[in-house]
Image (cartoon, helix red, strand yellow):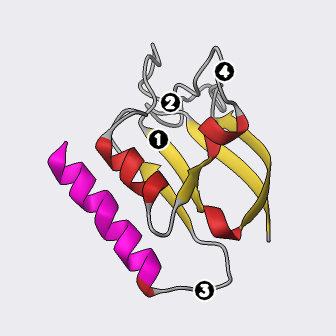
Amino acid sequence: AKDREAQAKAIVTLAAGHATALPQVVVGDFNDWYGSLAVAALKKGPPAFTEAWGAKHPGASTPGLTCCHPSFKTRIDYIFVKSASLKRLDTVSLAFTQPYGGQVLSDHRGLFAAFTPR
């Protein structure tokens, strides 16, 4: 857990060192649960990042479970958008929820987000 927190803080430091008016987006399999220190570090910043699923679906009865096939009991995959560059989250949804051509594309579900920058 401490390693993941340190990695998240390194991402925040990197983002701060590349300050830009353009949106900064961090995506991936963080191998960490929603309330973890790593997720908190990204949300705290500086710069602070908005966790897309949680922001678009606060208190949702299905918390965007992404891992792992076939039971999908946890969420360890995230999309973070630098809060200062975010005007609005338009869509945040699960992707790859059904097999394609009879094949499961991954043991994780994907996430899709569309947003309007400031």
The residue type indicated by label 2 comes to Thr
- Mark 1–mark 4 Cα distance, whole angstroms, equals 16 Å
**Which disc is residue 77 wearing?**
1
Percent x, y for residue 69? Answer: 44, 22
Q: Callout 1: few (<14), some (14-19), or many (20+) C-alpha neighbours within 10 Å? A: many
**Which disc is residue 2 wearing?**
none
Percent x, y for residue 79? Answer: 56, 51
Secondary element at tag 3: loop
* Residue to which mark 3 is pinned: 20
The mark nearer the N terminus, 3 or 4, is: 3
The residue type indicated by label 3 comes to Thr
Secondary element at tag 4: loop
Q: Which residues are magenta?
A: 1-16
**Which disc is residue 60 wearing?**
4
The residue type indicated by label 4 comes to Ala
The answer to whether mark 1 and mark 2 are in CB contact below 8 A is yes
The answer to whether mark 3 and mark 1 are in CB contact below 8 A is no
Q: Callout 2: few (<14), some (14-19), or many (20+) C-alpha neighbours within 10 Å? A: many
The mark nearer the N terminus, 2 or 4, is: 4
- Mark 2–mark 3 Cα distance, whole angstroms, equals 31 Å
The mark nearer the N terminus, 3 or 1, is: 3
Q: Is residue 50 shown above or below 61?
A: below
The mark nearer the N terminus, 2 or 3, is: 3
Secondary element at tag 1: strand
Q: Residue at x 53, y 85 (%)?
A: 19
Q: Residue at x 48, y 52 (%)?
A: 43
